[in-house]
Structures are given as structure tokens and as C-alpha cells.
Image: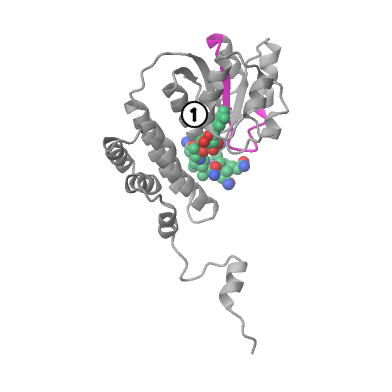
Amino acid sequence: MLDIDPTGILVRYNVKLEDELNPDEIARELFPQDVLLSKIVEAVFEGDEDEVIITLKDAVEAGKDPISLIDDALMVGMDIVSQLYEDGNLFLPDVMISSHAMTDGIEYCKQISGKTHESKGTVVSYVVEGDIHDIGKKILIVLLKANGYDVIDLGSDVSTDEVINAVLKYKPIMLTGTSLMTTTMYSFMEVNNCLLENGIHIPFICGGGAVTQDFVMNYELGIYCEDAAVVPKIADMILENKNIDELREQFHVH
Ligand code: B12
């Protein structure tokens, strides 16, 4: 008889073992050490909208900055949900419930951030046609507003015509586009071409899970960055009259 450990074979063929951790246990291992942050992360993971607000309130009262809590806690919770969903440990309804809880949390942070609003300029933001993933865009908008920009939020599943009309109407310093799906991101190219046809040469910042720098480099106005937190810095540099080449030089990975 060969001396073989069967657990090794089961793991290799992705067969779940009886003593495997359940989703709650896997998630808990990923929670942050900080107790206040961990409670917010747990509330997002559980999809408990009331608890998200209660735990955010506790953290703010304890001195945490509401805008930082978006990145340090709400995003962490959503990342854990995303990871477990992709690994097959959670289902789509779980993701939807958590994403609603996260959205409520973002709104709360936005309301109490207390940053005074002195508009530095207008930005138009949207999620591409056919795509309803709008959490990243919501974060982006909170960060832009917190940094003094007026944002025209066109929402999600937005057609090229709607984007161009909004740009013509509001004359923003830049346009941001989000796409989470490989099937939808091709409309960035169409928007780019329509902007050029209308004689509009504003930076078109593109991001979201499906998008890559190589893809964005294919169109003239495109600037890519991975993290929404960088977008206010790009806006600040546009106000310093940096052109698209200079912005690519500064923010693209070389
Ligand atoms: C939450 C979620 C949903 C929620 C969306 C809720 C909502 N209101 O947004 C629900 C459950 C509704 C959903 C539905 C679907 N989903 Co979904 N979803 C996700 C999931 C798990 C997380 C996305 C998310 O919100 N992440 C958290 C946010 C904060 O991250 P983010 O959006 O990427 O934003 C960050 C950055 O990308 C960046 N960013 C975002 N925008 C911008 C813009 C600029 C300018 C810049 C610079 C940066 C930037 O900054 C943010 C923070 O740093 C992803 C998996 C994943 N890991 O991405 C799948 C995922 C995106 N979904 C997917 C799919 C296929 C679908 C469905 C088609 C499922 C179905 N069979 O029905 C539908 C799509 C319906 C549609 N027409 O759009 C696929 C897409 C695959 C692909 N590559 O094309 C993914 C990747 C899951 C997978 N691995 O299969 N989904």
C-alpha cells in the first residue's frame, strides 16, 4: 500500500474538504487589526446597512477621518466580499447586499466629512453603457468633492450621446469614465472619438476593474490610473495647465 495523503489530492483538484473554513471564518481572517475599522468591515461583509452607519459613527467619534474610512474600512469590507465571491464562497445576492451597505456608508461619510465646498472646477463622471457597477464611481465622486471639485454625476449605463451632451453643457476640466466589465469598456474609444469630432480636447480619465493602461493608451485623450484616490491629484495638475502627455508622464506606470 502506497503512503499517500488524500488531502493533498483533494486540494489539488479543488474539492472542498469537510474541515474547510466557512465564508465567515475566511472573512474574519482578513479583517483589520484595528477594532473600530474591523467592526465597519464586518458590517459591510454582513451587508448590515444600519450597523455600517453605527460603526462609522463610532469611528468618527473616536477621531477617525470620515473620508479616510472609505478606503480604510468600507473598501476593505467590499474587497473581502469580492474576493470570497470570486473564489466561489459567496453568491451574487451576498455581493448586492454588501454593495448597498457600502453605498450607504459612502453617503454617510460624504455627509459628515464637513469639508467646505469651494469649487475649484467641474468634472463630469459616468459609468459606461451596459455597466451598472457604480461603487468605484461613487468613491471617486466623494473624493473629488472632498477636494473641492463640483461633480456632474451622470450615473451608470450611460450612452455616448449623454456623455457628449453633458460635456458640451457643463464644459468640465476633465471627464472620468468607469468600466468594470471587459465587454463594456470599448465605448471609451467611441466617447474619445466623439469628443475629438466636437473639438473637445479635455483629459479623459478612465478606470475600473476591467480597464488597463495599455487599453487606455490606444485613444488620444485617455489617461489611466488604477486607484480612484489619485483622480483629485490629476484634477489639481490639470488646473496647473498640465497637458495630456504630461499627465501620462506623471501618472502612468513606465
Ligand atoms: C459588486 C459587484 C457587482 C454588484 C454591483 C453593485 C454596484 N452598484 O456597483 C452586482 C451584484 C449588481 C453585480 C452585477 C453584475 N456583475 Co459584478 N461584480 C461586483 C464585484 C464583486 C465587485 C465590484 C466592486 O464594486 N468593487 C469595489 C469597488 C470599490 O471597486 P471598483 O469599482 O473596481 O473601483 C475601484 C477602482 O477600480 C478604481 N476606479 C473605479 N472607477 C474609476 C474611474 C477612474 C477614472 C479611475 C481612475 C479609477 C476608478 O477606483 C476604485 C477604488 O480604488 C466585481 C468583482 C471585482 N473584484 O471587481 C464583480 C464583477 C465586476 N462583476 C462581473 C459580472 C460579470 C457581473 C454581472 C454580469 C453578473 C451577472 N451574471 O448578472 C452583473 C452585471 C450587470 C451589468 N450589466 O453591469 C464580473 C465582470 C467580468 C468582466 N471582466 O467582464 C466581475 C469582475 C466578477 C467576476 N470575476 O466575474 N456585480
Q: Secondary structure at mark 1?
A: helix
- Horizontal side, residue 130 vs residue 71: left or right: right
Q: How many marks?
A: 1
The image shows residue 7 at horizontal and vertical percentages of 56, 74
Q: Residues within 10 Å of mark 1 (few under 14, many from 20)?
A: many
Q: Is residue 148 magenta?
A: no
The residue identified by callout 1 is 140
Q: Range of the magenta residues?
A: 169-187
Figure check: 43 above or below 251: below
At x 33%, y 23%, the residue is 114
The image shows residue 238 at horizontal and vertical percentages of 58, 17
Figure check: 112 above or below 118: below
Q: Residue 5 lies in what quarter of the image?
A: bottom right
Q: Is mark 1 within 8 Å of ligand 1?
A: yes
Query: Can residue 126 be seen in this snapshot?
Result: yes
Which of these two is toward me, 239 or 80? 239
